[in-house]
Image: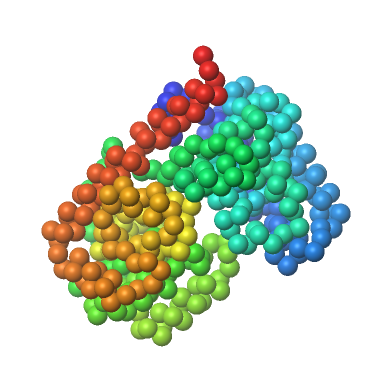
Amino acid sequence: VELRAMGHDVYYFAGIVDRPPEKSREVAEAFFGHPDVAAINEAVFGDASSGRPESVSRAIDELTAHLKGALYDFVRDFDLDMLVPENALTIPMHLPLGLAITQLAAESGIPVLAHHHDLPWERQRFLVNSATDVISAAFPPGLPNVRHACINTTQREQIARRLGRTARVVPNVMDFENPPPAPDEVTAGLRADLGLADDELFVLAPVRVVPRKGLEHAVELVARLGRKARFVVSHASGDEGMEYEARIREFARLLDVDVLWAADRVSDFERGTDTQGRQLYSLGDMYDACDLVAYPSLIEGFGNAYLEAVYHRKPVFVNRYPIYDVDIRPKGFRNIEMSGFITEAVVEQTNAVLDDPALVAEWTETNYAAGLRHFSHKAVRDGLQAEIEEMFPA
């Protein structure tokens, strides 16, 4: 979006593409969920750490060669001047794709701006593996024509220490210059449609159900507020298994917290209807309808859901995870905060905020103004423009 706003032509390469065909190239094997990729990941991560079968190495090499050929075609057919891999040289969920991009960059010399979200050393599930050679080569690569952009200052420091390379911080942003549309009749009907009573506190967790989201802390807070409340989880478990969701369901049962698992009623992008004819709500609708956003994450690359809550002017209960403390909190945001665990002071502050609409208005306006200053699209455009000017000096 920002590159287009800066006047650049943008083309897309992916395993599943939702962009115009004349601007994109879809290669099925580039999708991390492709069966061939899944088989490689199953063989090299987790328990399979004592060695890598030669057949798996051969599969990696063959898929790398296929994807590299497709990338060469992509660069040539669209006459590209640079590549911007989005997390593809970062999280090692697709080893052949990362190798293919790295080899293309090494062979062709094309300028590459690698945007990093989830570095391999930040995710425990990738630490035990039999693919250290691949990860060291491509996640991320240390090539002279590959420049790096990351989403927080801690990553910038790690890239400098581990690769000896500088990186520009390009944080998550929202379109604060253009506020979201006002809630309408669809939003107004959301609570009743999902079975929430008018006098029921609506606490939203706008996240996937994975352990690092710390949802047990939100369940505990709801239990201790002493209010009629519903804890609503907007997304499903994703790619990290179902064990954590089972744990949260059991914990909520033990604390007598009513949880609504709403993933089947929420669309990440636009409203619609499901196969049963039921209304599908946008994530923005969920923010607009809720009373409090719960974001007790233990670790985040940045905190997109936090910015979304700020954008929709909602009070937020947040855990002081490391990046929040370093890159967000010092910017002047006002939130209900915990530091690793729920205390009685946190419970009392939450109830006090919920009982004071004027304070909610003051905090949310303060937060929106801070978001506009520090995490708007303009802030990203300025950083990207400076990076591109350095890559293509006049």
Residue 106: give x, y in percent of width and height.
72, 31
Q: Is residue 336 above or below residue 114?
A: below
Residue 361 or residue 298, whichever sits in front:
298
Q: Which residue is found at the position 53% from the left and 45% from the top?
A: 157
Residue 315 or residue 10, whichever sits in front:
315
Q: Is residue 69 above or below residue 253?
A: above
Residue 36 or residue 170, whichever sits in front:
170
| Residue 175 seen in the current view | no
Residue 332: give x, y in percent of width and height.
27, 49
Q: Relative to 193, is 252 on the left or the right?
A: right
Where's the N terminus, which quadrant?
top left
Residue 233: give x, y in percent of width and height.
40, 66
Q: Determine the image quadrant of residue 86.
A: top right
Q: Relative to 75, is 364 on the left or the right?
A: left
Q: Is residue 227 above or below residue 262?
A: below
| Residue 226 seen in the current view | yes
Outermost residue on the right side: it is 54
Q: Which residue is found at the position 78% from the left and 39% from the top?
A: 65
Q: Determine the image quadrant of residue 141.
A: top right
Q: Which residue is found at the position 28% from the left and 71% from the top?
A: 346
Q: Which residue is found at the position 58% from the left and 64% from the top?
A: 240
What coloring was used for the rendering? rainbow
Outermost residue on the top side: it is 394
Label count reads: 0
Q: Determine the image quadrant of residue 100.
A: top right
Q: Relative to 99, is 180 on the left or the right?
A: left
Residue 165 or residue 282, whichever sits in front:
165
Residue 125: give x, y in percent of width and height.
63, 62
Q: Is residue 226 above or below residue 87?
A: below
